[in-house]
Image: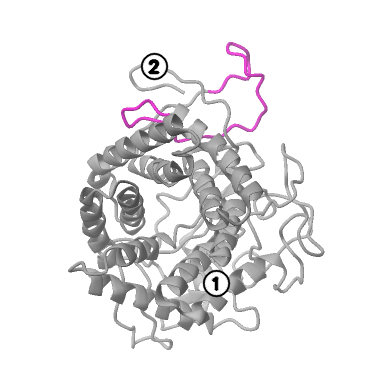
Amino acid sequence: MYHPDGRSISVSGGWHDAADLTQGTGNTAESGIALLEMAGTVQGKDSIFYERLLEEARWGLNWILRTRFGDGYRLGGLIIGIWTQNIRGDKDDMQAEARNTPTDNLKSASYCALAVPHFEKKDPVFARWCRNSAIEDFQFAIDLLDTQRTGNNEAELYALATVTAMRLYRLTQDSYYLDWAARLARTVMDCQQLDRRTDWKIPLRGFFYESTRKKRILAYYHQSQEHLMVEGLSMLLTDSPTHADAPLWQNACEAYADYLRDIARTIAPYEVLPSAIYEVNNTDYNNLYHEGDQVGLPSLEEYNAQVRNGIPLSKDFYLRRFPVAYQFRGFHAVVMGKAKAAFILARLLDDRQLKDIATRQLEYILGYNPFAMSTVYGDGYDYPPLYGAYAGNVVGAVPVGIETFENDDEPYFPMQNNCTYKEIWTHTTARLMWCIAELFK
């Protein structure tokens, strides 16, 4: 990996993100956070499992720490697709350019901050390395946050920054981070629909828009960060219940809880949470990752056809059971993003209904679905072989997930074993662990 100033770092090691051997900071950090969240729930209850979780989490931490230049620049991601010999100068060498982006630095800071308490006694030098890196990376991110804000990413970016600020506040008890979290949370709340849409057949409220301009409702189709908005607000309420903004945080969390309860009633009998609300003629393909010109870019007609196959809310708005998607189909991540949010709010609001809703999402992945099969390799009954590519079938691996057929809005899981729907992916595998950790709490 090369820095713009010419310096270079070897980025060997770590975990691959998926069966095709892609690799990047984001998925590594999120996977490590899932491991550490699980470690926190079993600490003092299962010492063998706890130590194994820390061993694996440290493998990811070492890679995250070794692939940063210490000035904000670090590895973002690399599509690999081959095993390399680890010898420089031969034909399998691959190169990537380091980048300085708030998202990568915030995820890394969160990962490192969460790790510190687990390693302070057993390896104080390593814990100090994690602490210092978390503090530095948060500041690198904050310095560039406004320059990276767009009409598409504002809610997610500021929610991620809020969660990271709160992790650093919990680590350091420095009010600097609490102040930042409260400030960032105001932007997140400005992206939310607080009043019920009484002009819709189902008067929903609590969902988030992509930005404070509220031009388009937030939706995910491949990866998902939908938990972040309520996670940051929940952390603020828990740690600073007497803050002047606490009533606003409470109202925002209750509004999103209403959203989850309301949409949970719309799909029977499986009760998997619908993915998102879409508006006809309102999409943006500028940031759509697309592999290969020969596949053909999606069209507005295709988008509208998918939207109109959803549950009608009004002439132009529809609630889709599954995301509007094109090349990257398979939606376990979207399901678990909402499940995580439901678990967080169930704990915050002491709400058994929300916990049951969240648990049902995991049951859908593990077998309570129209195919009556587990989608997790080696767990449950009738699980299929997965697209392991270079990795092969791995016990416990979670695929990208059940998809839809063309423009339809109903579950579809082809028999053939191919990407992306049956591809092994750390994002989904880690998120299942991350949601199961909630059940341990």
Q: Return the residue nearer the eye: 347 or 187.
A: 347
Magenta stretch containing residue 90, yes or no?
yes
Residue at x 50% of width, y 62% of height: 337
Answer few, some or many: residues within 10 Å of disc 2's Cα (few below 14, many 20 plus, some between 14 and 19).
few
Instruction: Name the one closer to the observer, 98 or 51.
Output: 51
99 with respect to 414 (left or right)? left
Image disc number at residue 162: none
Q: Quadrant of residue 213?
A: bottom left
Q: Per the image, is 355 magenta? A: no
**Image point (23%, 59%), residue name:** 182
Task: Give residue 372's quadrant in the image.
Answer: bottom right
Residue 308 at x, y = what percent?
51, 75
Q: From the image, tell me which residue sits under label 1.
A: 358
Which one is earlier in the sequence, the residue at label 1 or at label 2? 2
Per the rendered image, the range of residues in magenta is 68-94
Q: Nearer the viewer, residue 343 or 222?
A: 343
| Residue underneath mark 2 | 7
Looking at the rendered structure, the kind of residue marked 2 is Arg
- CA gap between label 1 and label 2 equals 46 Å
Q: Is residue 235 above or below residue 346?
A: above
Instruction: Residue 309 in the image: state x and y as whole percent.
Output: 55, 75
